[in-house]
Amino acid sequence: MGKNRWFMALAVLLILALVACGTKTAEPEATEAPKAEATPPPAEEKVELRFWMHQNPAFIAANEELIRRFQAERPNVTVKLESFEYDLFIQTLQTAMPAGTEADIIEMFGTWVCSYADGGRLAEMPDSVMSRAEAEGLFFAAPLQGYDCSGKLYGLPNEFNIENGAALVNPAMFEGAGLAYPPKWETMGDMLADAQKLTKFDGDVMTVAGFHNVSGDGLAFQLLAGILQRGGDYWKPDGSGLQLNTPEARATLEWMKSLVDEYKVVDPFLFNDDSNWVGDAFFSNQAAIAFIGPWAAAEGLTEYPDMEFDYAAIPNYAGDRHYFAADSGWGKVVSINSQHKELAFEFAKFAAANADNAKTWNVTTGTIPALKSVADDPTLLEELPWIAPDLPILQYGRYVGSLPDRDLFWYDIVYPHVLGVLQDTETIDEALAAIDTEANAMFE
Amino acid sequence: MSAFVQGVQRRWRRALSGPNRAKSLFVGSALTPLMLYMLFWTLLPAIWAVVLVFFKYSATRSGGSILGLGGDNPYIGLGHFQNMLSDSLEAQKFRISLKNTLIFAFLVLPLNLAITIPLAVAIEAVQQRLKTAFRFVYFLPTLTASVGVAIMWGYLYHPQQGLFNMVLKALGGSPKIWLTDPREALLGVPLAMWAIIFAYLWQDMGYNLIIFIAALQGVPQEFKEAAVVDGANTWQIFWRITLPLLQPTLLFVCVMTMLSSFQVFDIFQIMTGGGPKDYTRVLVLDIYLNAFRFQRMGWAGAVSMILFLIVLVVTVVQMRLLRTRWEY
């Protein structure tokens, strides 16, 4: 009996502790138009906003500058920036949110936003800060749609995340191979002909990939763009799931496979995410043309200041328009638990919708603007010359869509199966069937 | 309840009076911080993991009002365990991870013992100064951070610039893609898994080696001398005297090695990330990916429970098989 009492006491203690450590229950939020805070802080009242982001030196520098400007405009507001190493950032979000201890403002990748918003973790943007219609006029559709969940806006994008349309190129290698530089490829065949001449072998071992496109991000983006450029769609007509076992998908995989078997410009065993990630391969002179987003060029300028490289437009995979799927991009959202939601959204608007500030952010981070007026700014290319190939195709970008789990689709479904095709461990039929089945299982 | 409170008070009074007072206070003050630490950082998370097993829980969803359980994070009972037998993607990955974990653990243990026991006997046989040097050299990798070990071995296995391929080429062989080629296998085990096993053994064996050396020093010399008098040779002394007397140590080493093998994460995460084709995806990596990349905390909790049960069963079986009823 005595022992039972001790167990009961211990159980009560544990339950109390669990409750104490547990969720700070979010107040029920109005599902209609969000209201402004009941008691907005008077202008002179000191307010501190916490701002969380992932650790990337360029992104930190950009946000610090915007914070400095915001604080200069609002002397009573302090924005405290806290950054986390990338993996830790995601883990911290997932542990802090249930406990209600996350920051007021969070720099979030657009494609994650609806997962958190639909789960009730994020605050809806008040119309008093910016209406959805207003935002649609200011931002490109692809990045904005990542922040638009079931018709409600949950933040604003700074970046138009794009992986298609251009590639890193190494001028020294072009010169070494006696190829014209800068490259002016009219067709994909032209680019692959150059890539073949740029590919190097030591015996049977490929030492330089002429065209390295085998990456977790790259393969999925190429598959989706290939489908769109061939006139297909990867979403079912009713939007209930994905259709990836289609003739357009097959043609795209056949083209990818031809890079390995026919053109021999990449070895999928030596050049893939696990063995030699595309960015590392390029900046260590093991890839002459590297399929990756322009953000890699910005990072390369910082990390490899002595290396000569450019970011060159690559032709369409098929068709005459460079249609592609885009992954929204980094932007600002506000926690449902913030005590200063409206003020936090004001900061998001200040950072993303003000042309000067948005341009500063894009220039500092080296990313493509989500704000149309910044992309149209003729001075932008003076500061970000490498994004020139991407700007003309932004109009053909569409948001990848509201996937239940973006990372699962990219890294655990598309990448392993397409890699399996490239490595000859799966047939195209098997891979497409598996991708289609596994992708649609996400919606169940 | 009042009787319970009175009982507690009575026990406290008894403990805090008389000759035991100082002892009780010392024990209490020494143990309380540790117990609180264990309670909050070990027991509570473990209980939370058990709770999550019964929910389709994701930290991205706020869920119900009690700890975020219910609502968007619904109660599904034993649904995760039933799902483990299905053809769903996560179930397939779980089964692959389970198989890989078992392959890893059951290869690491015998290989570790096959290296460390003879090595310990050899080191024990050399003179004291050399013995200290060997112990230091072999134990050094154990002190190295796993991340550093994984990165270093990753370079050694690098297909173009790695040491192993340089040696292979120098010997006229063809270079291998050690970590990322799903076609390469040895004895039915993927080459990438072997590559990680050897990197892991390099780091882990120093620990067991030190334990075996210490145990060898505890083996009474008289037994060996008696065996020599009876005409036993070195091999017979090792096989019939030394090894049986090492059985309690062997039990400890087997249990600890098996436990750590089932829990290995960082070396897999850094060297292969689970590839190629999931051939090195182990349970802890699967748990990590589900919990933090795919936001399936409930599922990750269920896989953790399975891992816990496997470790428990394997440990109990080892303890049954290797237990001794004697001391020396």
Image (cartoon, grey):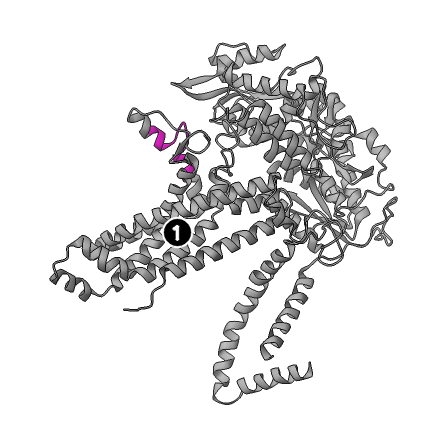
Tell me which chain the residue with mark 1 is part of: B
Where, by quadrant of the figure, is residue A421 drawn?
top right
Extent of the magenta region: B153-166
Q: Quadrant of the N terminus of chain B?
A: bottom right
Residue A206 pos. (x, y %) = 44, 21
Residue B127, visible in the rendered structure: no
- Which residue occupies 82% across, 46% down? A342
Asked if residue B155 lies in the magenta stretch, the reply is: yes
Is residue A87 placed above or below A418 in the rendered structure? Answer: below
Residue at the farthest bottom position: B18
Residue A317 pos. (x, y %) = 64, 16
- Please name whichever residue, B123 or B321, is drawn nearer the observer in this view of the structure: B321
- Which residue occupies 24% across, 63% down? B219
- Please name whichever residue, A6 or A329, is drawn nearer the observer in this view of the structure: A6
Left or right: A206, with B83 as reference point: left
Q: Secondary structure at mark 1?
A: helix
Residue A306 pos. (x, y %) = 51, 26
Residue A406, visible in the rendered structure: yes
Asked if residue A80 lies in the magenta stretch, the reply is: no
Residue B289 pos. (x, y %) = 58, 43
- Which residue occupies 11% across, 62% down? B229
Label 1 environment density (alpha carbons within 10 Å; few <14, some 14–19, many ≥20)? few
Residue type at mark 1? Leu
